[in-house]
Image: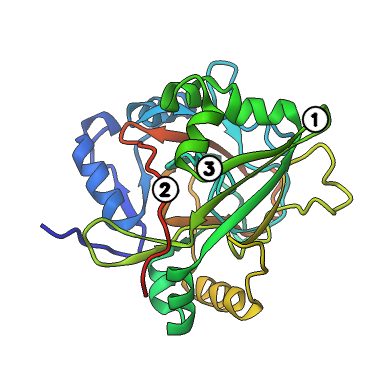
Amino acid sequence: MSQTINDRPLLLHSQGRSAADIPDDEIWDNLASHGAILFRGFGLDADGFYDVASRFSRGFLVSPFGDRKPASDRNELQTVTVGQAGLSLHFEYGNSPLRPDLLWFYCRKAASEGTGGETLLADGAAIFERLRPETQDMLKARRVRYRNFVPPDAFEAILSKNETVGSLVGPDVVGALSRTQDFRVTEASGNRVVFEFVAPSVQPIGDTGRMRVCQNMFTDAYKKPTDDEADGSFSTLVTWEDGSEIPPAVLDDLKQVARSLTRGIRWQTGDFVLIDNNRMLHGRNRTSDPARDIVMLSSFSSRFRLDPVAEGIPA
């Protein structure tokens, strides 16, 4: 049976059920259809949220960078990016060749009414369908290249010596990624590691016949290696596979369509959301409430698999 796709996140009320009462297949099916599920009224604390996420996950990826802080002394929970500023739409770890396929957020304290802070979602499948035909054809035909600059200890923390990553691809992480993901390390020194990989701009969604935008081509979230604050952090350049710039007309089309399709989650304390991190971009609105408190997990699902990187898709 062909899978049904809906570009609206699903609001799932408890209706007297506990999270443990919901069958796994119901969650997976709803996620495949909607791309994101907002759970409301389940009465979970942060530890209960972690237990739900663990049920669907093989392991979690913890950010080693200072823009996130530990949110628990018992597990991998972290804060979202600290501060009150808005964040551009992006895929979490979209500049990594090994991207967690699930993203989880839990609201410990909602922002006060009228102070902003909504989490933003935009469906990559809906975005692709609204693009100009010439943009669609270009994205199907061309792949993108990520060139990343990162401190050596951070490279080890998120890739080469990460235990969760090693359990997924084997102890030789760099070798496994080089064989399957068009990945290579181009510089390794005491100051930084430079690595790059190539990925398809769009990919099909199962047997639906639909395509999804799946790369961080138009986000403003990345620092560039020339930025003053880039030293000691993660910075990224995104180009076409041959190193040429992605045309402004393509980026403008992507941004305008994504903006028109963006939906906001108005959090209630105790809500949590599950996001397909290969299909749904996320961001946030600025908030004037410093007490807003959202924590997160990035996970490799129990259904995660590392597929060889695909070539361009014929137009």
Q: Earlier in the sequence, mark 3 or mark 1?
A: 3
Left/right of residue 294 with respect to residue 25 in the rendered view: right
User: Please, what is the three-letter code of the amino acid marked with disc 1?
Assistant: Ser
User: Please, what is the three-letter code of the amino acid marked with disc 3?
Assistant: Pro
Q: Which mark is residue 97?
A: 3
Does residue 266 appear in this view?
Answer: no
Task: Mark 2 vs mark 3: give the one in front.
Answer: 3
CA gap between label 3 and label 1 equals: 20 Å
User: Please, what is the three-letter code of the amino acid marked with disc 2?
Assistant: Ile
Left/right of residue 226 with respect to residue 223 in the rendered view: right
Q: Name the spot of residue 165 as percent of width and height, x first.
A: 49, 27
Q: Which mark is residue 275?
A: 2
Task: Mark 3 vs mark 1: give the one in front.
Answer: 1
What colouring does the structure picture have? rainbow
Q: Earlier in the sequence, mark 2 or mark 3?
A: 3
Q: Quadrant of residue 209?
A: bottom left
Q: Quadrant of residue 153?
A: top right
Query: Residue at the spot x=59%, y=21% of the render?
Result: 161
Left/right of residue 288 with respect to residue 183 in the rendered view: right
Q: Name the spot of residue 19 as percent of width and height, x first.
A: 29, 33
Q: Residue 249 or 24: which is nearer the viewer?
A: 249
Task: Mark 1 vs mark 2: give the one in front.
Answer: 1
- Dot 1, crowdedness within 10 Å: few (<14), some or many (≥20)? few
Q: Name the spot of residue 240 as percent of width and height, x first.
A: 60, 64
Q: Residue furthest left?
A: 1
Question: Circle 1 — which element?
Answer: loop
Q: Residue furthest bottom?
A: 133
- Dot 3, crowdedness within 10 Å: few (<14), some or many (≥20)? many
Mark 1 highlights which residue? 189
Say if 74 sits above or below 32 in the image. above
Q: Earlier in the sequence, mark 1 or mark 2?
A: 1
Q: Give the quadrant of the C terminus.
A: bottom left
